[in-house]
Image (cartoon, grey):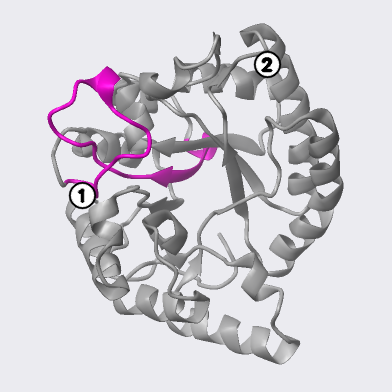
């Protein structure tokens, strides 16, 4: 549990997990202070931390922000990491060298979940070579994050329209992520689940029941556009959860409840129609969709 709130907050929260307002994932940028106010107004239990903004605060301002979050019963959601697992060796080494300072900031603010996505293909690396490289790099990143008390989540990307575009497909299913986690061998590393990738990978609630709750670092819930076959879905075209009914969100959420998942849940719809709305309307619609499916 992160350090800003002691209980699950807001009307969109549930008995097993808490809703997380991530403005960036919604394609909006109200500013962090405004995001906190919107999260409180619309019943979100968490807000995604803006590390750049937090780094500008004085000790007095930081104390005021912590108090404001606690007063609204808002904790931290998950965040990203400034490391590209798919980068060339020199770039990865540079990013890794800078990660301890970033991890220290996460620790200072009691942010306890961070993650990144797995690029599901390569033009140059075979599956086996790519797998070995990812195991090595994930372990290096995890060592730094674990020392700071931060869970490390990996998100797989399911659409065939994406992973089939280069010579060598790579990890793009939950089963493959579980193999990757087993090879890394750290209990601190887990999976970031997204309903869209779960759906496009043709997975079921039973696949989720095969996970332990502690293996899940964070969750994204989205729906898929209607009128397309599963293998026609595009990664950057989604809808608010429950908007189309294409994805079995009830089965997904029900399985998470069964295994006892207790982390953040956010929406990442990549939806141009939603982004075109006023910021407050975007947040309101997102909160409404979460309340309906959770």
Could you say whether the residue bearing mark 1 is in a helix, strand or loop?
Answer: helix
Query: How far across and how far down the image is residue 189, in percent?
Result: 64, 36
Q: Is residue 217 left or right of residue 13?
A: right
Is residue 237 visible in the rendered image? The answer is: yes
For the point 85% across and 38% down, the residue is 93
Q: Which residue is mark 1?
A: 293
Query: How far across and how far down the image is residue 155, in percent?
Result: 51, 35
The mark nearer the N terminus, 2 or 1, is 2
Tell me the magenta residue range. 213-242
At label 1, counting other C-alpha atoms closer than 10 Å, the crowd grade (few under 14, some 14-19, many 20 or more) is some
For the point 67% across and 13% down, the residue is 124
At label 2, counting other C-alpha atoms closer than 10 Å, the crowd grade (few under 14, some 14-19, many 20 or more) is many
For the point 58% across and 63% down, the residue is 2
Considering only vertical position in the picture, is 60 above or below 39?
below
Q: Which residue is mark 2?
A: 130
Query: How far across and how far down the image is residue 242, in percent?
Result: 17, 46
Foreground residue, 127 or 193? 127
Q: Is residue 141 left or right of residue 117?
A: right
Considering only vertical position in the picture, is 181 above or below 54?
above
Looking at the rendered image, the disc whose residue lies closer to the viewer, 2 or 1, is 2
């Amino acid at each position: 549990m992160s350090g800003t709130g002691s209980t699950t907050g807001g009307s969109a929260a549930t008995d097993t997990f808490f809703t997380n307002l991530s403005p960036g994932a919604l394609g909006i940028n109200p500013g962090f202070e405004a995001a906190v106010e919107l999260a409180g107004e619309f019943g979100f239990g968490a807000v995604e931390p803006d590390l750049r903004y937090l780094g500008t605060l004085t000790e007095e301002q930081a104390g005021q922000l912590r108090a404001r979050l606690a007063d609204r019963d808002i904790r931290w959601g998950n965040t990203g990491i400034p490391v590209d697992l798919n980068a060339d060796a020199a770039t990865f080494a540079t990013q890794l060298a800078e990660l301890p300072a970033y991890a220290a900031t996460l620790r200072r603010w009691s942010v306890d979940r961070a993650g990144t996505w797995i690029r599901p293909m390569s033009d140059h690396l075979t599956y086996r070579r790519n797998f070995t490289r990812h195991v090595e790099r994930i372990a290096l990143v995890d060592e730094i994050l674990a020392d700071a008390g931060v869970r490390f989540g990996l998100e797989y990307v399911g659409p065939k329209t994406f992973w089939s575009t280069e010579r060598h497909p790579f990890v793009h299913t939950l089963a493959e992520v579980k193999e990757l986690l087993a090879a890394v061998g750290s209990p601190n590393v887990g999976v970031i689940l997204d309903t869209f990738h779960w759906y496009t990978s043709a997975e079921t609630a039973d696949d989720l029941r095969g996970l332990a709750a502690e293996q899940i670092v964070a969750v994204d819930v989205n729906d898929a556009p209607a009128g397309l076959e599963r293998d026609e879905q595009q990664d950057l075209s989604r809808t608010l959860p429950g908007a189309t009914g294409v994805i079995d969100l009830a089965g997904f959420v029900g399985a998470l409840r069964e295994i006892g998942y207790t982390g953040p849940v956010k929406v990442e719809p990549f939806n141009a129609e939603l982004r075109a709305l006023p910021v407050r309307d975007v947040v309101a619609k997102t909160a409404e969709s979460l309340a309906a499916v959770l």
